[in-house]
């Protein structure tokens, strides 16, 4: 399961006011900014058998990860209102995990398995593929209720051992 770590120490009063108002603070880094959001309106939605839905922001040119391979991905995790509850961008490092092995929520595993390295995608993850038991977030972050849908913007940065040609 994806771990949610604490909020960085530099919250301003405007950030706290944004949290209190139920709005995402403007200073939070995102994988899909305003122009990207507008472009996503014209991207077709793909729905998988499991109920996962996604829109490709950018199709990658690298390989797709085989089940069990380690991947490095950046993500911004949001509740449907757009409030961020976790983000690798705030931590400054991509998240490393073995895809398809249950180290992250089912919807994230499924969404990344069909991506190519270098790609960026918005995942609309239904409750059963997200946090069936819910998630208590860090202070100032929205709580994820049991079986609630979540949205992940994810970029598959690289797949160690697959991105470069073997010599």
Image (cartoon, helix red, strand yellow):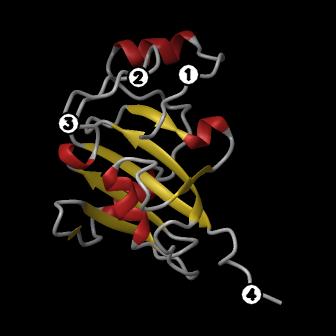
Locate residue 129 relative to residue 2 in the image: left or right: left
**In this picture, is 113 found above or below 148?**
below
The residue that disc 4 covers is 165
Q: Is residue 76 above or below residue 83?
A: below
Residue at left offset 36%, top offset 25%: 23
User: Which is nearer the eye, 69 or 9?
Assistant: 69
Q: Is residue 8 left or right of residue 80?
A: right
Disc 1 element? loop
- Which type of secondary structure does the marked residue at label 2 adopt? loop
**Residue 89's spot in the image, x, y percent?**
60, 42
Q: Mark 2 highlights which residue?
A: 137
Q: Which residue is mark 1?
A: 6
| Front in this rendered view, residue 30 or 149 | 149
Q: Residue at x 62, y 69 (%)?
A: 159
For numbered disc 4, what is the local secondary structure? loop
Distance from disc 3 to disc 4, alpha carbons, whole Å, reads: 41 Å
Instruction: Nearest to the eye among marks 1 and 4: give it.
Output: 4
Mark 4 nearby-residue class (10 Å; few <14, some 14–19, many ≥20)? few
> Is residue 39 visible in the rendered structure shown here?
no
Mark 3 crowd level (few <14, some 14–19, many ≥20, 10 Å Cα): some
Mark 3 or mark 4: which comes first in sequence?
A: 3
Along the line of sight, which residue is nearer the eye, 40 or 8? 8
Q: Cα distance, mark 1 to mark 4?
A: 38 Å
Q: Residues within 10 Å of mark 2 (few under 14, many from 20)?
A: some
Q: Are marks 2 and 4 in contact (CB under 8 Å)?
A: no
Q: Circle 3 — which element?
A: loop
Q: Is residue 89 above or below residue 111?
A: above
Cα–Cα gap, marks 1 and 3: 21 Å
Q: Residue at x 58, y 62 (%)?
A: 71
């Amino acid at each position: 399961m994806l771990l949610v770590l604490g909020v960085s120490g530099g919250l301003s009063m405007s950030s706290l006011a944004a949290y209190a108002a139920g709005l995402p603070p403007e200073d939070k880094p995102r994988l899909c900014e305003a122009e990207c959001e507008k472009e996503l309106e014209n991207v077709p939605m793909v729905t998988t058998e499991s109920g996962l839905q996604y829109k490709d922001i950018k199709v990658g040119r690298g390989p797709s990860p085989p089940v069990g391979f380690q991947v490095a991905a950046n993500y911004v995790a949001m509740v449907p209102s757009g409030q961020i509850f976790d983000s690798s961008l705030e931590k400054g490092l991509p998240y490393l995990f073995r895809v398809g092995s249950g180290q992250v929520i089912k919807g994230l595993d499924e969404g990344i398995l069909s991506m190519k390295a270098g790609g960026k995608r918005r995942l609309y993850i239904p409750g059963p593929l997200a946090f069936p038991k819910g998630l208590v977030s860090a202070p100032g972050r929205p709580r994820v209720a049991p079986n609630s849908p979540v949205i992940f913007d994810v970029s598959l940065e690289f797949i160690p051992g697959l991105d470069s040609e073997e010599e």
